[in-house]
Amino acid sequence: MIYLKNYLTFLVIITLTLYSCKKDVEIIEEKDEGLKTENVIIIIIDGPRYAETWGDNSHENIPYLAKTIKLKGIVNTNFFNNGFTYTLPGHLALSTGRYYPIDNFGGELPPFPSIYQYYKQTYPDKNCWIISSKDKIELLSNTSESDYNNKYLANTDCGINGLGSGYREDSITTYNTINILTNEHPSLVLINLKDPDTWGHANNWEKYIESIKKSDEYINEIVSLIDTNPYYKDKTTLFITNDHGRHEDAYGGFQNHGDNCEGCRHIMFFGYGPDFKKNSTIDTRYELVDIANTTAKLLNFNLPNSNGIVMEELFEKNN
């Protein structure tokens, strides 16, 4: 009950803050001629703290990312969820460019369309997928907004067998991802790996750390496919981030999340692709909603009513 009251209070406060700070965003009108990206893949490692990923100087929990994959792209050490630090709100932010306190238990559709729907509207022949260990992420394929409800839907492979079926193992999600990328060739993909969040909530530190290391291994498998499959090689931009972090030790520790402490807000970010800088690190303040706008720029579709901006500093040339 205390948790619920704190959650509701937090929603009221942050909703007022966010809606008073909306950014005006220029809609993408035409593709920059020099861009080479044809596909975008977004991987969400659900719920590790920054302190256990890029914030740990040893990088012992993300060896593939830190020692090999990093050479291909760009790390941002100053990346944040500035909205609601729960699973569905975090995924919604990067998928729509807007922060909104959507029911984290899966009880409502998003009130506005996502990048997946705008992309499918613009390119109806393109293939788009949402692949997730958590079944509730399937909700992001649709919206309650009347002009887009049940239209321009992404394909989904979420949970055991879709919405309401329960969560599945990340190993299955990775296996399914490899199959879908190989056989379906989607051009816009969202992937959720749940285990760090699951073991964090279980208050099992050893499994929590182990699951971050496994996520790193799964990502390496996906990157290996991207770098060798002719459909994706040299034509694909990859984003790797989190939906939220976890409480700092001074605010209750790693078991939970959901407030505005640094541990919940500060999250990892890595991007690589044919248009991005290589083997680089920046500390420019960007946030989850900016992934939506950057994706829209890369794939050349309009994203109206977004609160995000294009992360221009990622690009090899400032387009």
Image: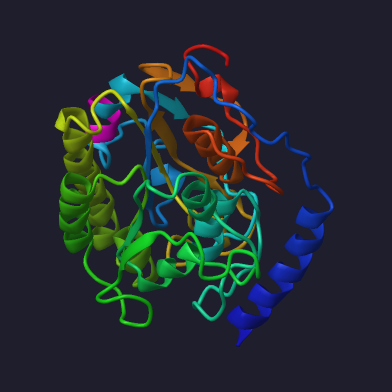
Question: Is 67 part of what is drawn in magenta?
Answer: yes
Residue 2 occupies quadrant? bottom right
User: Which residue is outermost to the top?
Assistant: 317
Q: Where does residue 55 sit, x and y in percent of width and height?
A: 43, 37
The residue under the point 61% across, 70% down is 102
The N terminus lies in quadrant: bottom right
Looking at the picture, does residue 113 appear above or below residue 63? below
Which quadrant of the figure has residue 172? bottom left
The mark tally for this picture is: 0
Taking the image as drawn, is residue 252 in sight? Answer: no
Question: Farthest residue toward the right?
Answer: 20
Q: Main secondary structure of the magenta part?
A: helix
Is residue 316 magenta-colored? no
* Quarter of the image where one finds residue 29: top right
Residue segment shown in magenta: 64-68
- Residue, x 39% and y 36% (percent of image)? 54
Foreground: 129 or 146? 146
Indicate whether 30 appears above or below 127. above
Q: Can residue 145 be seen in this view?
A: yes
Residue at 38% x, 47% y is: 125
Q: In this view, does 232 lie above or below 205?
A: above
